Amino acid sequence: MKEFVQNSRRCLVHTWWVVLSLVVLLTACTVEESNGPVESDKAVEPAPSESDKAARPARPYQGDWKLPGLVDRSGAQIEVPTPGPATGKTLDVTDYGANPNPDSDDDAAAIRAALDAAKPGDEVLLPAGTYDLRSTDPDDESTNIVLHSGVDLRGVGQERTVLLTSLDGEDDSRVIRGSGVHDVIVADFTITSRYEGGLGDDPDDDDAGGGPMYGIHLGAHEGQASYQILVENLGIRRFERHGISVKASREVTLSGNYISEATAVGPGGQGYGIAIEGSADQRDPDAANDSRHNAVIGNTFDGKHLRHAILLQFPTHNNLVADNTIVGSQLDAIDLHGEGEYLNEIRDNTVVGGQRAGIALGNSGGAKNKHDASGHGNWVHSNDLIGNSQGVIVILGTPDTLIEDNWITAGEESEVGIEVRNGPGTELHGNHITGGNDGFWAIRLAEDRGTDGRGKGIPSGIRIESNVIRQATNGIRIDAGEDLNLLKNVVDGMDGAKLKVADGIKGVKVE
């Protein structure tokens, strides 16, 4: 088992070097054509710099929360609090009977015993080895390990400590669960399963799957959110639904994790790398389980077997998704899932080779919960989107999205750089778009046919300003819309049309 982990990681490291070389090459080409500033602030910490704060869009909204990103009600910048280092004892799980050799008897009971013996401020240590998780918690038959507030769980390295679960398709099964917990660090190991079947590669297949439903599941307990949790430097693979799920919680930081190999990518919530979710029936920001101020920073996703790499769903707000690297995905790589997600900041991510959109706002799916529009005021900026089918797409009535300063490089199979359908008040500002083949358009406005009657409409109140489109197949295409403003855009070096406006469209202002 340990040999498999190491060999798998070596192969993926090689793949990432190839991808990063491609990113550097394509970015260099784009910069040369744009003749503009080429450097951007790529800070990895949750709190943006002073220059980021100055650039934050001053777009107030109704209610207490007015600005996107990691801000408080007044709009003042915050830092997401994370637990400090352990100040108490270190409890070694091998002292409680865990055996780090592969294919030993159950090690889950010993890990649980160490956690039960720990006090707030202590750390439970998993030395190098493979830990076989064959049993579940006596009070929760769906979970191998239950976290305790104030107690850290740490391995000695993502490639050196492995948790190997025997969970296989059980409803709501979780390797690690934290419900209503706080001040916890989970770090430095890999979670995988004994599942040896095929991996998810068909978004329409709802029969595939195996392994645990969730690698890590953090949620509320009796209406009280989990909070102030750090999950870092984990490897998670061979799960069915979510690698890491954060539900109705706040102040959770997910950083430096590597997620891949979902066993299913079908409808109904399968194959998500990281999911940050509010509650479908909870829209009160004063509630104890309000979902906000979570930070998804610097994670890496091999999206070949992921439906979505990062997903925000239900009325979760004022979260930050930054500096993540995603290569490939079956559907939209970063997806605001069409259930009212609002005032979130999506910045400085690199998304390469997705089969759908690099970043999507609004979603047409949903069986139990019918999706349509994302919420208002989401801010998508400074991302590198390379070779995706679409760079950014806004649909189904998602309002007041600001899309700015993104670098979009089309590939041979790319269809559009930025597409807006029914997205009232969307602003496109300062984006750089290049590349493409045949029918590619850098920016397109089109009618939204809706989904089962929801979200139907046309682009309205759209502002397209100071974008730079160079060496692309085609420039800006307007198939539908009203109250459209195209101002100070640079469009040159086209193989095809610079601007195409369909007959009968009124209210288009071009400067």
Image: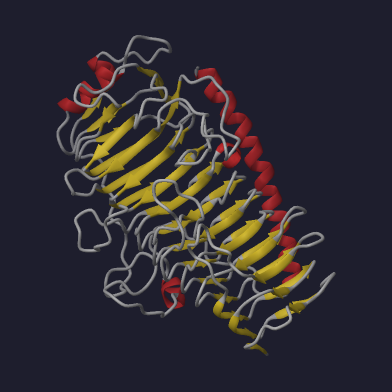
Q: Residue sitting at 36 percent across and 55 percent down?
A: 314
Q: Residue sitting at 67 percent across and 70 percent down?
A: 443
Q: Residue sitting at 40 percent across and 58 percent down?
A: 339
Q: Is residue 205 above or below residue 400?
A: above
Question: Is 466 situated left or right of 280 in this image?
Answer: right
Question: Is 87 situated left or right of 340 in this image?
Answer: left
Q: Is residue 241 above or below residue 110?
A: below
Question: Is 15 situated left or right of 423 in this image?
Answer: right
Q: Quadrant of residue 358?
A: bottom right
Q: Is residue 134 above or below residue 118?
A: above
Q: Residue furthest right?
A: 495
Q: Residue sitting at 63 percent across and 30 percent down?
A: 11
The quarter in which the C terminus is drawn is: bottom right
**Which is nearer the eye, 500 or 118?**
500
**How is the model colour-coded?**
secondary structure
User: Where's residue 263, x and y in %?
Assistant: 52, 30
Q: Is residue 297 visible?
A: no
Question: Is 91 situated left or right of 41 in this image?
Answer: left
User: Where's residue 399, x and y in %?
Assistant: 46, 72
User: Where's residue 368, x and y in %?
Assistant: 39, 46
Q: Residue furthest front?
A: 453
**Which is nearer the eye, 448 or 141?**
448
Q: Is residue 279 visible?
A: yes
User: Where's residue 256, x and y in %?
Assistant: 45, 44
Q: Quadrant of residue 14?
A: top right
Q: Quadrant of residue 319?
A: bottom left
Label total for image: 0
